[in-house]
Amino acid sequence: SQTIHQWPATLVQPVGSPLSLECTVEGTSNPNLYWYRQAAGRGLQLLFYSVGIGQISSEVPQNLSASRPQDRQFILSSKKLLLSDSGFYLCAFWDREAFFGQGTRLTVV
Amino acid sequence: AQRVTQPEKLLSVFKGAPVELKCNYSYSGSPELFWYVQYSRQRLQLLLRHISRESIKGFTADLNKGETSFHLKKPFAQEEDSAMYYCALSPGGYNKLIFGAGTRLAVHP
């Protein structure tokens, strides 16, 4: 069966520090992968999506970047975090419907 | 531009009352529409999609292309329906899933 793993569950990072959130998918091949940010009152904002290895589309200009080094691995990164990067980040993949990870609560202090 | 609008941030009803969660979309083509639900401390998950035309947990949603709406309805709300509900649009090809801001449904005993 298909599963999606996202870690860490919570993260507290100082301003200016780097970020790496990892997402891996099992039980499916060549999935479409997504990073969303969930903000209270603003819903789910699509940040990046990928239709294949090395193929990244950015939906909004921001301080973050994404990479897909392997078919079932999707990474969200930043070289220098800003306070405004705080939020709840969700990874997802598509297989006839979208399946979501448990999410990462990022707090930049 | 592709957009999903959920005008209500919170919908509060009593058990047994009818429920309608509103969703309007903006898209020039033929989208696929979904409702996702997030129960407390659980992952975001698919509730239903318009092409299935099925009832899930007593909920139904009809796509009205003339009004560009996809409202979610249930004739008799239950306490276990309390959750965050997101309307979502896929513009085709499943390369993107665009979400609304979400509506929190609170069903009181």
Image (cartoon, rainbow, N blue to C red):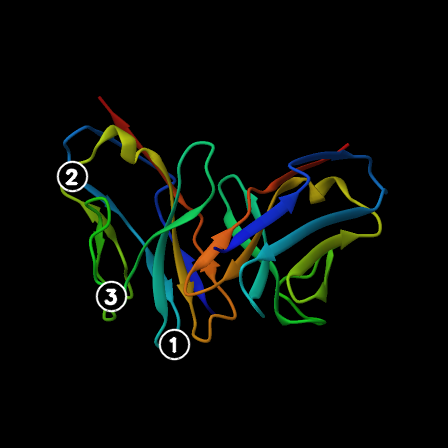
- Taking the spot 42% from the left edge, 67% from the top edge, the residue there is B90
Q: Which mark is residue B67?
A: 3
Q: Are there few (<14), some (14-19), or many (20+) residues within 10 Å of tag 1?
A: few
Horizontal and vertical percent position of residue B96: 51, 67
Q: CA–CA distance between discs 1 and 2? A: 32 Å
Residue B76 occupies which quadrant of the picture? top left
Q: Residues within 10 Å of mark 3 (few under 14, many from 20)?
A: few
A64 to B32, vertically: above or below:
above
Residue type, numbered disc 1: Ser
First of labels 3, 1 by sequence position? 1
Looking at numbered disc 3 in the image, what kind of residue is underneath it? Answer: Glu
**Left or right: where does residue A15 sit relative to residue A65?**
right
Q: Which is nearer the N-term, disc 1 or disc 2?
A: 2
Q: Nearer the viewer, mark 1 or mark 2?
A: 2
**Residue B92: horizontal and vertical position, in percent?**
43, 74
Residue labelled with disc 1: B28
| Relative vertical location of residue A42 with respect to residue B2 in this rendering, above or below | above
